[in-house]
Amino acid sequence: MKTPLPFHFRLPFLPLLAALAVALPLHATAASGKYVRLYGDPAPDNIAARTIVITPETRYINAEGGEVIRFVVGDRSFAWSFNVARTVKAFDLNEVAPPGLLPHRVRAYVSEDPKYWEAN
């Protein structure tokens, strides 16, 4: 029969195990695209500053950080508030659109929110 390790030998591994327990689920979440909160938030259609019609030829859209845009696809629409994280420069609009609304990949390119520009 093996003798269990003394308590002081097991203790240093406890923080490592705790870190792995937290990091592995976060890694799986990041790989599956669950960080859409970094891309902004859904918005009511009526507060959109402008409207973009998505056609079969649309491959990308340009948005400004902080902007609210209404997207029209056929007879359906949705609005998105581009309050993105500072590190987000582009993402697939399909990740935030209602499921099945966009029939093809549309890339959203987001410029920096002007309210955070430094005055020179």
Image (cartoon, rainbow, N blue to C red):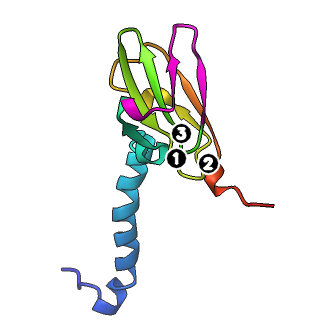
- Which of 92/33 is in front? 92
- Distance of mark 1 from mark 3, alpha carbons? 10 Å
Asked if the residue at tag 2 contacts the one at tag 3, i.e. Cβ–Cβ closer than 8 Å, the answer is no
- Which of 24/36 is in front? 36
Q: Residue at x 54, y 45 (%)?
A: 66
Disc 2 crowd rating (10 Å Cα; few below 14, some 14-19, many 20+) is: some
Q: Residue at x 40, y 8 (%)?
A: 74
Residue 13 in view in this figure: yes
Q: Residue at x 38, y 77 (%)?
A: 15
On the image, which quarter does residue 72 sit in?
top left
Task: Give SS at disc 3.
Answer: loop
Quarter occupied by the N terminus: bottom left
User: Residue flagged by tag 3: what amino acid is it?
Assistant: Glu
Q: How many marks?
A: 3
Q: Counting residues from the N terminus, which is met first, the one under dot 2 or under dot 1?
A: 1
What segment carries the magenta color?
Answer: 46-63
Which label was assigned to residue 118? none
Q: Is residue 50 left or right of residue 78?
A: right
Is residue 48 within the magenta segment?
yes
Tell me: residue 56, above or below residue 113. above
Which label lies toward us, 1 or 3? Answer: 3
Q: Counting residues from the N terminus, which is met first, the one under dot 3 or under dot 2?
A: 3
Mark 3 = which residue?
A: 67
Q: Residue at x 37, y 20 (%)?
A: 77
Q: Is residue 20 left or right of residue 91?
A: left
- Which of 109/11 is in front? 109
User: Residue flagged by tag 1: what amino acid is it?
Assistant: Val
Which label was assigned to residue 84? 1
Which label lies toward us, 2 or 1? Answer: 2
User: Residue flagged by tag 2: what amino acid is it?
Assistant: Asp
Mark 2 = which residue?
A: 113
- Distance of mark 2 from mark 1, alpha carbons? 9 Å
